[in-house]
Amino acid sequence: MLDCEVLLPLGMEEIIQQFYKAFDDGDVEHMVGHYHDDIVFQDPAFGQLKGERAKNMWRMLRGSQKGREFKVAASEIEVNDQAGRARWDAYYHFSRTGRKVHNIIYAEFEFKDGKIIKHTDTFDLHRWAKQAMGFKGWLLGGTGFFRRKLQAQTNALLDRFEAKR
């Protein structure tokens, strides 16, 4: 009898676990490999990103942390047949200021064809801004003006990143 390994599709919980483990390990291609080609991602820092642009956002973010202290820890993972959610904590130094950040993010996922089709991250943008930017973030981080300006800046960085790929 042949010893043959049967590859079964990953369960939704395993997809989320592997997604964050790959992120923590710096294996962005494995991470974004869990995204459906038609992925829709949204968060306070970038707004809505679709398809390859959403994948490139992770490539850009993780690439900017190469050689720097960076840690991701996922917890509170809950799933059903079509959706899931998790808390994930990111620990890093914000590249523009060098300030230490501990961002607490709540993620919601929807699945299609065994992949993540929709991923929405929410976090306290004001809290993040205070950590990342100090007094300026404390002063402006809770405003719509700040959110719009941040999204314009992050998307401009992503445009430049994609132009180089």
Image (tube, rainbow, N blue to C red):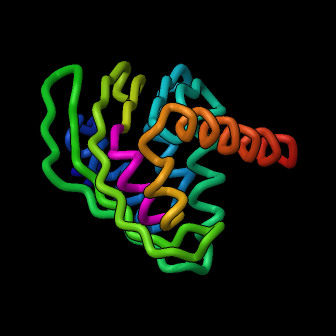
* Count of marks, rendered view: 0
Q: Residue furthest right?
A: 164
* Image quadrant assignment for residue 104: bottom left
Residue 25 seen: yes
Place of residue 16 in the rendered image (x, y in percent of width and height, measured from the top left): 29, 44
Task: Measuring from the top left, give residue 136's x and y in whole percent.
Answer: 54, 59
Locate residue 117 relative to residue 84 in the image: left or right: right
Q: Position of residue 116 (x, y in %)?
A: 39, 30
Taking the spot 64% from the left edge, 38% from the top edge, the residue there is 149
- Where residue 84 sits in the image (x, y, percent)? 21, 32
Residue in the foreground of this view, choosing between 113 and 87: 87
Q: Is residue 106 a member of the stretch shown in magenta?
A: no
Tell me if 145 is positioned left or right of 125 in this view. right
Asked if residue 69 is positioned above or below residue 122 in the image, the reply reads below
What is the span of residues highlighted in magenta in the rendered image? 122-132
Image vertical order of residue 154 relative to residue 144, above or below: below
Q: Residue farthest to the front?
A: 139
Q: Which is more toward the observer, 112 or 40?
A: 40
Q: Residue at x 37, y 62 (%)?
A: 90
Question: In the image shown, does 92 or 153 lie closer to the viewer?
Answer: 153
The residue sitting at 33% across, 52% down in the picture is 18
Q: Is residue 124 magenta?
A: yes
Image-based side of 106 in relation to 78, left or right: right
Q: Residue at x 31, y 30 (%)?
A: 109
Name the dominant secondary structure of the magenta segment.
helix
Q: Is residue 4 visible?
A: no
Q: Identify which residue, 30 or 2, lies in the foreground.
A: 30
